[in-house]
Image (cartoon, rainbow, N blue to C red):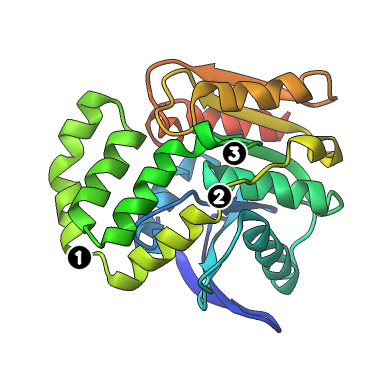
Amino acid sequence: MKAFMSTVKTDDFTMDYCRFGKGQKNLVMIPGLSIVNVLTSADAIADAYQVMTDDYTFYVLERRNDLPDHFTVEDTARDCIEAVRALGLENFSLCGASYGGMVAMSVAASCPELVEKAVVASTAADITDEVYKTVGSWVELAKKGDPEALCMAFGEGLYQKDVFEAARPLLKEMAAVVSREEIRRFMILGEGMKGFSIIDRLDRIKCPLFVVGDMQDGVLGAAASQEIGRVMKDRPGFEMYMYDGFGHAVFDLAPDFKNRILDFLKS
């Protein structure tokens, strides 16, 4: 499926995004940390979510183009709110993975009137020093300017061992083409995760929320997803599902992940 590429302009910034699907309902997707620009894989993302494109029109948001040297998760959430308003979107569903899940929870808590339903995967509501450890090690590799070491460490964190070994050649190819600016942006966003916490504001999320995690999450840990479930378990419309064996990238690897999202959003 072909994704349509465009740029949204606000009073404060420009942000690239892609759009695909033909559904009457809108779904805003906020990606996780990525070493390379996620929109270079826009068509692949559209293909991966094809099971949902009859029901939804997707908007996949990148970060602002002029990323400053210091930028937090909450800063990204404010940008996303400004971008969706500039696009004229309201009463949309929201989906975010990892870093994108933190942003999605922040958007849903800050502007509950905008979000109809939300799905977050492999994410955390409280980035303690322990939870941040793996991302922090990636940030240090980015600071050293060693793209191959960064790409390998990134892949090893995201994937279970067999998937990581199979992905080694692609990770090496990525390391060979990643730009200094992409590494700079990765470092800034990774640093901006440190100390993030929305655990005391989860009750501001009024829409139905679906949390997906994996017991073998090697980046943020299974306990991070489970903590959200502990806080939100009695809230109307809350659902949670924990896989076991796909790792942090469960949102890419679990074969039924998209169908679970679709079932939740249509329920």
x then y, percent, for residue 137: 36, 44
Badge 3 or badge 2: first in the primary sequence:
3
**155 left or right of 221 in image:** left
Q: Which residue is mark 3?
A: 127
**140 left or right of 145 in image:** right
Q: Nearer the viewer, residue 165 or 57?
A: 165
Q: Amino acid at mark 3?
A: Ile
Q: CA distance from mark 1 to mark 2?
A: 25 Å
Above or below, comparing residue 174 to residue 200 in the picture: below
x then y, percent, for residue 177: 20, 65
Q: Which residue is mark 1?
A: 177
Q: Within 10 Å of the Cα at label 2, are there few (<14), some (14-19), or many (20+) other Cα atoms?
A: many
Q: Nearer the viewer, residue 8 or 198?
A: 198
Is residue 4 in view from this perspective? yes
Q: Residue at x 54, y 18 (%)?
A: 242
Location of the C terminus (image quadrant): top right
Q: Nearer the viewer, residue 190 or 112?
A: 190
Badge 1 or badge 3: first in the primary sequence:
3
